[in-house]
Structure formats: structure tokens, C-alpha cells
């Protein structure tokens, strides 16, 4: 009867986090699990993976489609080991699913890739195309 025990080290027992769970652009019906002010705009599985790895979580990335997603992108989900074999939280600060989702929501905007996207740089490519157009005349 050993197969009836909960072995939290097996990947199938790990929790799943889809990007829609922490996407501020989604409604609760579309799959958002936490409050909008705790969410982030259009997170990717890569961003969630990076944030979780930096926190020391044991994770796995799977190419699965969230069943509430209408289109085929973005694909992917993150599996996170929450508990040790004995059932104790693997990381005490992340004892619940919501605590992990809140952490993801507050950490993704701090990523360098997010800060570069929202930097106040002008689009120099547009200026160059205008100059080329003027030269051709």
C-alpha cells in the first residue's frame, strides 16, 4: 500500500502555475487567481521560471496549454515542488500557492528584461527611416 502515501518529491504532486494565474489582463473567469493589483501584465513562462529559480524553488517547465486559453499562445506551465517528503513546506516563506503567486507578481516587474521594455528610450529606428526617406527625395 505504499502507492497510497503522498510523496511530494514526485513531479506529478507538484503544483502547477500557468501564466494566466498572475496575468492582470485576464479576468477571474479567464483564469486569474489573485487580485489584479498583485498581478503583472502578460507574464511568460520564462519570466515565471526565472523568478522561481532565483527564489530557490525546485521547478519544472512543461509545454502544456491552459484549458481556458482561447488562442494557442502563450503555451507552458511551471510545476513547483511546495513540500518535502515529510509534508513540510520546502521553503517556509512559500507555504501556500497564493504566496508563490504573490511573489511571482511582485518579482517579475523587477526583472531586467521588464525594466528595459519600460525604459524611456525613443525608437531610433523610426527616426532613421524618416531620414532615409528625406534623402531619397
Image (cartoon, rainbow, N blue to C red):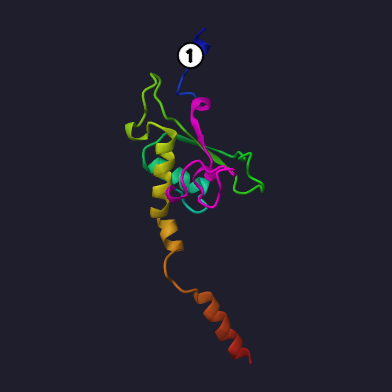
* Residue where numbered disc 1 is placed: 5
The crowding category of the residue bearing disc 1, from other C-alpha atoms within 10 Å (few below 14, some 14 to 19, many at least 20), is: few
Q: Which of the two residues, 30 or 12, is positioned nearer the viewer here?
A: 30
Q: Position of residue 95 (x, y in %)?
A: 37, 31
Which range of residues does the magenta coloring cover? 11-38
Left or right: 120, with 68 as reference point: left
Q: Is residue 12 magenta?
A: yes
Q: Which of the two residues, 67 or 50, is positioned nearer the viewer here?
A: 67
Left or right: 130, with 94 as reference point: right
- Is 137 placed above or below 48 here? below
SS of the residue under disc 1: loop
Left or right: 13, with 68 as reference point: left
Residue at the spot x=60%, y=38% of the render?
Answer: 64
Residue at the spot x=52%, y=12% of the render?
Answer: 3
Q: How many numbered marks does the figure carry?
A: 1
Quarter in which the C terminus is drawn: bottom right
Q: Position of residue 102 (x, y in %)?
A: 41, 43
Q: Position of residue 105 (x, y in %)?
A: 43, 47
- Is 126 placed above or below 113 here? below
Q: Residue furthest left?
A: 92
Q: Is residue 99 magenta?
A: no
Left or right: 7, with 74 as reference point: left
Residue at the spot x=37%, y=27% of the render?
Answer: 89
Q: Position of residue 111 (x, y in %)?
A: 40, 53
Q: Which of the two residues, 131 or 86, is positioned nearer the viewer here?
A: 86
Amino acid at each position: 500500500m505504499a502507492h497510497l502515501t503522498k510523496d511530494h518529491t514526485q513531479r506529478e504532486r507538484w503544483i502547477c502555475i500557468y501564466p494566466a494565474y498572475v496575468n492582470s489582463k485576464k479576468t477571474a473567469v479567464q483564469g486569474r487567481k489573485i487580485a489584479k493589483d498583485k498581478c503583472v501584465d502578460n507574464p511568460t513562462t520564462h519570466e515565471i521560471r526565472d523568478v522561481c529559480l532565483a527564489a530557490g524553488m525546485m521547478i519544472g517547465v512543461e509545454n502544456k496549454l491552459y484549458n481556458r486559453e482561447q488562442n494557442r499562445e502563450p503555451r507552458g506551465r511551471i510545476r513547483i515542488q511546495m513540500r518535502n517528503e515529510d509534508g513540510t513546506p520546502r521553503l517556509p516563506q512559500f507555504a501556500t500557492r497564493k504566496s508563490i503567486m504573490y511573489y511571482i507578481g511582485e518579482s517579475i516587474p523587477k526583472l531586467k528584461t521588464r525594466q528595459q521594455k519600460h525604459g524611456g528610450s525613443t525608437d531610433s529606428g523610426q527616426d532613421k527611416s524618416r531620414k532615409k526617406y528625406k534623402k531619397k527625395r
